[in-house]
């Protein structure tokens, strides 16, 4: 898959593969505490270089097979990972949908980088891959995620009690989706 440009800066979106192990390892290690409230409890070896390399190898295979697209937001030189946006559980057939998850480095939060990254990635998934629907859920207290998704055009569809086990406990989530505007029927 090609590398996607992000408007207005020298950042790029690329499908993460095992060749990105070093920058991904640094990203996850540096942002471990920052991301704790918004992610599942990770196993002890989650931050291990070899485990990250294996996960990224699988991410490359998943993208080749069209079942998931795990993008890294990287600087123009490809030497730093600033965030990630993952489109997983890609379903084809009559559904043509996927789930969205994302994270941004603490020091890059609030700069509009994730808005730019998701705009580019969603354009690719809707335009080139022909998906119809992208679904995202957020914890009700996560105001940044709520604002981001609404800014991107996601619409609230419901409220799921005890939806995902995040930070060690089952938490409610607001369910949202974005429909491909090119699919009117």
Image (cartoon, rainbow, N blue to C red):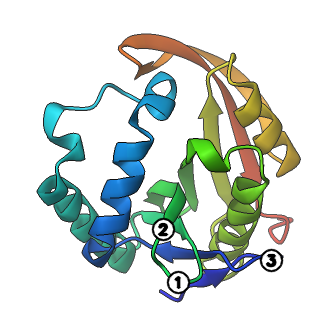
x and y percent of residue 21 in the render?
A: 28, 67
| x 48%, y 33%: residue | 35
Earlier in the chain: of badge 2 and badge 3, it is 3
In the rendering, at what x and y percent does residue 29 appear? 34, 45
Which residue is drawn at the image coordinates 51% and 13% (left, top)? 171
Q: How many marks?
A: 3
Q: Whole-Å distance between the Cαs marked 1 and 3?
A: 16 Å
* Quadrant in which residue 57 is drawn: bottom left
Crowd rating for badge 2 (residues with CA inside 10 Å; few <14, some 14–19, many 20+): some
Q: Residues within 10 Å of mark 3 (few under 14, many from 20)?
A: few
Circle 1/circle 2 CB separation < 8 Å:
yes
Q: Residue at x 47, y 59 (%)?
A: 91
Query: Which residue is at the front of the view, 128 or 102?
Result: 102
SS at mark 3 in the image: loop
Residue 136, position in %: x, y?
62, 41
- Left or right: 49 as drawn, with respect to 86: left
- Tell me the quarter of the picture where residue 141 sits: top right
Report the residue marked by disc 3: 7
Residue occupied by mark 2: 80
The residue singled out by tag 1 in the image is 77
- Which of the marked residues, 1 or 3, is nearer the chain's N terminus? 3
Closer to viewer: mark 1 or mark 3: 1
Looking at this view, is 96 or 83 the one in front?
Answer: 83
Q: Residues within 10 Å of mark 1 (few under 14, many from 20)?
A: few
Q: CA distance from mark 1 to mark 2?
A: 8 Å
Residue 42, which numbered label?
Answer: none
Residue 119 position, x and y percent, is: 76, 65
- Are the residues flagged by discs 1 and 3 in contact, CB closer than 8 Å? no
User: Tag 1, which secondary structure?
Assistant: loop
């Amino acid at each position: 898959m090609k590398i996607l440009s992000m408007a207005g800066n020298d950042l790029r979106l690329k499908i993460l593969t095992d060749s990105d192990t070093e920058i991904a390892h640094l990203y996850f290690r540096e942002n471990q505490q920052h991301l704790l409230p918004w992610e599942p409890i990770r196993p002890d070896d989650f931050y291990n270089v070899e485990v990250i390399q294996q996960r990224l190898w699988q991410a490359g295979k998943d993208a080749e097979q069209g079942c998931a697209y795990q993008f890294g937001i990287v600087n123009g030189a490809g030497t730093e990972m600033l965030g990630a946006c993952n489109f997983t559980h890609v379903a084809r057939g009559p559904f043509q949908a996927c789930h969205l998850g994302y994270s941004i480095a603490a020091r890059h939060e609030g700069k509009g980088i994730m808005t730019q990254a998701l705009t580019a990635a969603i354009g690719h998934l809707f335009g080139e891959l022909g998906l119809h629907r992208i679904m995202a859920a957020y914890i009700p207290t996560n105001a940044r995620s709520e604002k981001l998704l609404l800014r991107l055009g996601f619409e609230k569809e419901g409220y799921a009690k005890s939806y995902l086990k995040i930070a060690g406990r089952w938490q409610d989530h607001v369910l949202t989706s974005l429909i491909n505007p090119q699919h009117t029927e």
